[in-house]
Amino acid sequence: MNDTLHNDDDYTALVKDLALKGRAAQRLLARATDEQKAEGLRQAAKAIRAQADAILAANAEDLAAGEARGLSPAMLDRLKLDKDRLEGIASAVENVASLPDPVGEVISSSEAPAGMVLERRRIPIGLIGIIYESRPNVTVDAAALCLRSGNAALLRGGSEAIHSNKALHAAFTEGLEAAGLPAEAIQLMPTQDRAAVGAMLKAAGLVDMIVPRGGKGLVERVQNDARVPVLAHLDGICHTYIHASADPAMAKQIAVNAKMRRTGICGAMETLLIDTNFPAAADVLDALADAGCELRGNARAQAIDSRVKPASDEDWDTEYLAAVLSVAVVDGIDEAMEHIAEHSSGHTEAIIAADEAAAQRFLDEVDSAIVMHNASSQFADGGEFGLGAEIGIATGRLHARGPVALEGLTTYKWQVRGQGQARP
Amino acid sequence: MNDTLHNDDDYTALVKDLALKGRAAQRLLARATDEQKAEGLRQAAKAIRAQADAILAANAEDLAAGEARGLSPAMLDRLKLDKDRLEGIASAVENVASLPDPVGEVISSSEAPAGMVLERRRIPIGLIGIIYESRPNVTVDAAALCLRSGNAALLRGGSEAIHSNKALHAAFTEGLEAAGLPAEAIQLMPTQDRAAVGAMLKAAGLVDMIVPRGGKGLVERVQNDARVPVLAHLDGICHTYIHASADPAMAKQIAVNAKMRRTGICGAMETLLIDTNFPAAADVLDALADAGCELRGNARAQAIDSRVKPASDEDWDTEYLAAVLSVAVVDGIDEAMEHIAEHSSGHTEAIIAADEAAAQRFLDEVDSAIVMHNASSQFADGGEFGLGAEIGIATGRLHARGPVALEGLTTYKWQVRGQGQARP
């Protein structure tokens, strides 16, 4: 394939060809019943289990190539599949099959002044482009969510996982075909050339939405270059504010959990704001430092614990994704909310407070996709929200916000039923 | 102002300054009650009536300048205000005041597996940019819809209406202030330079959404250049399909209405598809020709009525916005839906049929923002849908589709109420 692709026009033509095939398959999928789509996913899970040996052999090829290229142990771990992980992937597909089909739901219905019956009905978005990095499970997770919601997918994974992705994709689409669904509903980009990604991002009218799954560099490139709508978040600079009224034990437990449970996820706390009237600030900072967290703070935070180093201006806008935390002591909820308005990335912010009125103000006035009261920001996740799975977390203001699951992969149309009305 | 703006950086800085003021005002507005916002709109209507003389004098300036510049009579008519039109503008504002406030609505609520209470609550989008052409009423209509839904607006009208827009804007914001709301919630771009529009379109993170209101040239430029999400439609190539089972009298009445009631609106029919088994095709074409409609058709349509001229390939993709219609005789609903899938702009398509199963297939399978059964596509309008008003009609697939009213000007956030949960 690469031999024949020489310039941008070739990649544009390739993406157009793939997109038209995907769109044709999506039109068939849009007519499939709930049960057909569920059966397709169950067959896909079955095929993944049946082809475990081939998938693991393909993965071993990727791992060997990755080691030869000097990938870090963390990267190799993200890439690695084994029997357990593969079973996890297959059962995740079955879990998506068990989720309710969002398509066809009547979102609202009413009668027009002229007497027509109006219904807004949920429909699939169309063809979703997924651009992701090394984790091969994304191939299957994204395919399953798209299929459950009646969408076609064009998948473009990282080159380091190419053999694993091809093997998983082959099994998945074999399952679809076994259930009588079109294999072209889920396509894998046949080239790893970066120009093909550029062509996907520009394919407005052919690709309906792009979901980038990966690090900040990937998301930033996609957001900058895309002419197609993108659902994603760039940063997760999540704040937790400990109000004066917070229960000290709860504040300590949540602060340590929000920062230290897993430091590398987007819902991890990056900045702790402590009310100057909260009596147990020293205890909270002590617990964080004891848990191995580096603390960087304003002068008032440094005055509480000598282990707090001075924070630079940059620290307040940094997503560390590591055991490092910015800490500021603030004068009340207004200063806390001002700090958040200035530095938040709009992902998740939390307040710890016994005072319900303060908590309500925070929930109402902080303008992030997710606002929490008395809970750890590490809960910012579609699974933890009971959505069954998620395609990602979005911080944009249009369409879906926060954890995006099946409903976020749908749009609607107006169905209008008249009795012969002509407009006066 | 123009004296000091020399390059793109200056316009970027101007837009940033306006956007930050607008966003600050929007945060105040987000805390305003339903009743405060309604009162602001009633005061705005009152101020428009009170300042009628000044507004009409400003409009006379624009009209004189427009005549001197040789604007067409149609353009001058769009620009013109008089007592009646001004009263229409003021009462439209009162009508928006009477619509229910969408902000705060709980879209869904559930309990997370870990016990937190989750609510998705409707919130304003933020700062909306409105870019429009000569009609001065858009200044007030758009401002009223944005304000009712808790959004700030940055308005950029056409230079030919600048005096009218300034006078209307002054009255509107005086009304807001009389109700204790921030005047900067509704700002008018202080320069007519086109570079300022370019800066608005690029202001991602400062302007949350752009709504272009105007002709195809304007919408196309906005869609091509914007880095901010755009809610709009480019074309309204609306199809009506007369099924074999259609009631002949209904088919004739709806076809003539859909094309000829007003030919210049986006919901006007541009292509008529007639089933080869519909027995009264000649009668329908006769009525259209008698009503003064030029007909361009395929060979099978030409065979029915000698007044049908041959259609070119381009005709099937043309939004005439005039008394011209493309007509094709097709072999059944599948061919009709294939034609629509190939040529539709995704705005509004209608089927005329007595056969309910055929109608249901059409409603389910045609993928446009609005699909109609036994009604004229001229009903594609927020007011006709009972939404009270509309900011526009959108054919994109994300966020709001079809007529966009107050709900389309909102987004949501997740409010999460815990009892101290740390994530296991």
Image: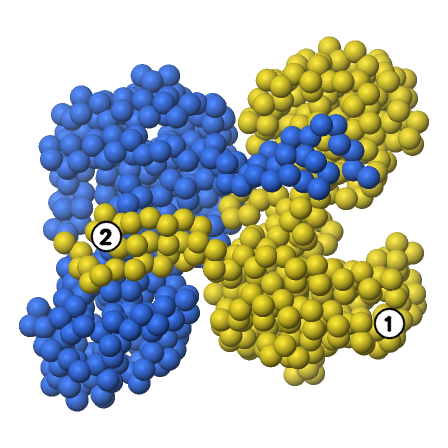
Chain colours: A blue, B yellow
Determine if residue A253 is in view: yes
Residue drawn 87% across and 62% down? B84
Give x and y (percent) for residue A353: 26, 71
Q: Residue at x 22, y 23 (%)?
A: A46
What percent of the width, then of the height, locates residue A30? Answer: 47, 27
Q: CB under 8 Å between callouts 1 and 2?
A: no
- The residue that disc 1 covers is B56
Disc 1 packing (10 Å; few <14; some 14–19; many ≥20): many
Q: Disc 2 on helix, strand or loop? A: loop
Labels 1 and 2 share a subunit: yes
| Chain letter belonging to callout 2 | B
Q: As shown in the figure, which amino acid type bears the numbered disc 2?
A: Gly
Q: Looking at the picture, which amino acid does disc 1 mark?
A: Leu
Residue B160 against residue B393 in the figure, above or below: below
Residue B340's x, y, as percent?
64, 27
Q: Quadrant of the N terminus of chain A?
A: top left
Q: A8 left or right of B48?
A: left
